[in-house]
Amino acid sequence: MSLTDDMHAQGRSAAAAPDGSAMLRRVGLFVLSAIIFIFCVLPFGLVLAISFGRKIDGAGWVWDFTLENYQRFFVGVLWPDEVTFLYLQQLGYSFYFAIIASLVAVLTALPFTLLLTRLGRSAQALWLVFIMASLSLSEVFIVMGWDILLSNNSGLPKLFKETGLTQWLKDTGYFQTLRDWGLANPRNVKFKTSDFATILTMSYLVWPYAVILLYPALSRIDPALAEAARTMGAGRWTVTRTVTLPAIRLPLFGTTLLLFVFLLGTYVTVTVFAAPNKHTTAVAIYTNIRGANLNAPFGAAQAVMLLVAAGVCLYLGHLFNRRSEAR
Amino acid sequence: MRFLGALYMGLAALVLSLPIVVVCGAALNSGRSMFFPPREPTMRRFGEFFVSEPVWTTALWNSVLVAVGAATLAVLLAWPIAYWLWSTGTRLSKVLAGLGSLPFAVPPIVFGVGLGFFWAFAGGLGALWAGVISHAILLMALPLVTISIGLQSIDRAHLDAAATMGATERMIFRTVVLPQTLPYTISGFFFVLVLSFNEFTVIFFVSASSYATVTLQIFNSLRNGYTPTMAVAAITFLAVSVLVFSAVARWGDLPRLMGADQSRK
């Protein structure tokens, strides 16, 4: 730091108008701080403030300080006469889809990333281009692709039927199992709408993120450790279990947590692939703010609850990390 | 074991490219509906997307404007913060960098809702320039990270040498700092460009249906059923992404940007 401080001192003394440039710097910093505050902090403040507002029938909403929206979120409008956990249930489905999808993504991305780090430098770069390209692909495109693949008239169900796989499933009796899981109608297999399709698409959505997030940690594992264990006679599986996995436990956990938080807000996938009775808080936020309901304060309250839920998870993760590091 | 590894990576590549391949194939359909494999393959949809259908050409133009504008703005905002953080490391600079990355770290829907309210008050709701600013703020975290990585890669000895030879801070900045961080700045620019191109949630809230980017247009068309023209959009976007990241990999250092260990080759 002393070097750069020196640089600053020198820069100032050498400048033609030292006071002017220092002044300029201060003004610049102030403007920058103001911009960051206005655009990065204020929007969240507005969401919080409006969540205490009140809806007016046919006329939008007004500022207020009421807890009605939060009451509605937890126990419904008619409380205490009538209690409904509909909105909590929606939050529950947000968690349900996000937890399973992030776990699936991380667990399948882990072996892939391990293999990736063992490749040569240029092969790694090639793979990374591929991964980054699919990472940046919009959710709407991905949903479109899987939608074509999973729709009843095209894609997999048709493939099942034409190849005789459906008939085979019926003959062997597995078809009934699929029906019990909600993955088939009386005639053929179906994937829309199903939890399977939702979770598949959601984990596909974050899979490249999982690779990118695991990549730095995995590429820093010292191969000498594993080699040492191997020369001492440990089997391949033993090495993975006792050397590699403990070394990457924290990044593994952190990645899952980040993907989980990201997936809490998934919208397009859930509207297309999830059954209507399993729609999540994100969908409810959309309908309240931009959709049919036009109840901005309640939408804002739901957004706050989603953020709080995400924050609590991140905080618990942080605590867990600290504890396992201290051990 | 080696074979199994290759098999697993191949399988991952297959699943990863499956929906993309399907979308690309569907673009070749000559009829009005999507089939895979395509029926009577034709390239007519490409003409519709790029030239003849105003819905798509306008959407494409909007997407390009928002992406280029947002990428430029994001880099301009991220540079002073990253530089300040690197050269002084004060607490305030750390706070600013943290706050600047905040929008990217929370579920995008919450920030989208917030910006929707914000622009409603600031008078930019539904204006294209508000969309540009929104994306710049949302994605600023990316150039912040890449430029910081670039600044950290500067050898402090170079700065010492320049300073002992009497260079002013401004000269050092121009002759040492700027050239050495240029590849990282460009990478940051392109990351924002590509992600803005593909972003849906935030632009959905700030556009307020008064204009459409390509992703918004596709989402609107979701309800009316797919048309092969949409698939052309997907191909275009994918091609842009691959080109951009190939360029970053070719001229920048993609593995390093992704945080790979430098000591091993």
Image (spheres, coloured by chain):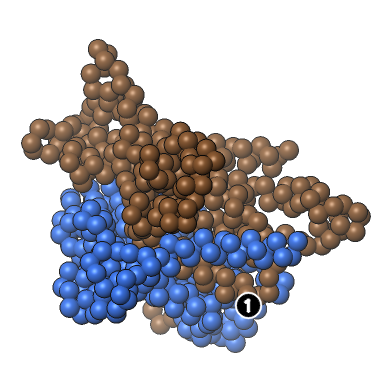
> Does the image show residue A12?
no
Residue at image position (48%, 42%) is A170
Chain in brown, by letter, is: A
Residue A252 picture location, percent across and down: 62, 49
Splitting the image into 4 quarters, where does residue A85 fall?
top left
Q: Nearer the viewer, residue A11 or B46?
A: B46
Query: Could you tell whether A32 is left or right of A262 in the image?
Result: left
- In the displayed structure, A175 sits above or below B78; it is above
Query: Could you tell whether B93 is left or right of A28 in the image?
Result: right
Mark 1 packing: few (<14 Cα in 10 Å), some, or many (20+)?
some
Residue A47 picture location, percent across and down: 28, 42
Splitting the image into 4 quarters, where does residue B134 fall?
bottom left
Residue at image position (32%, 46%) is A271
Query: Could you tell whether B78 is left or right of B202 in the image?
Result: right
Q: Which residue is mark 1?
A: A122
Q: How many marks?
A: 1
Chain in blue, by letter, is: B
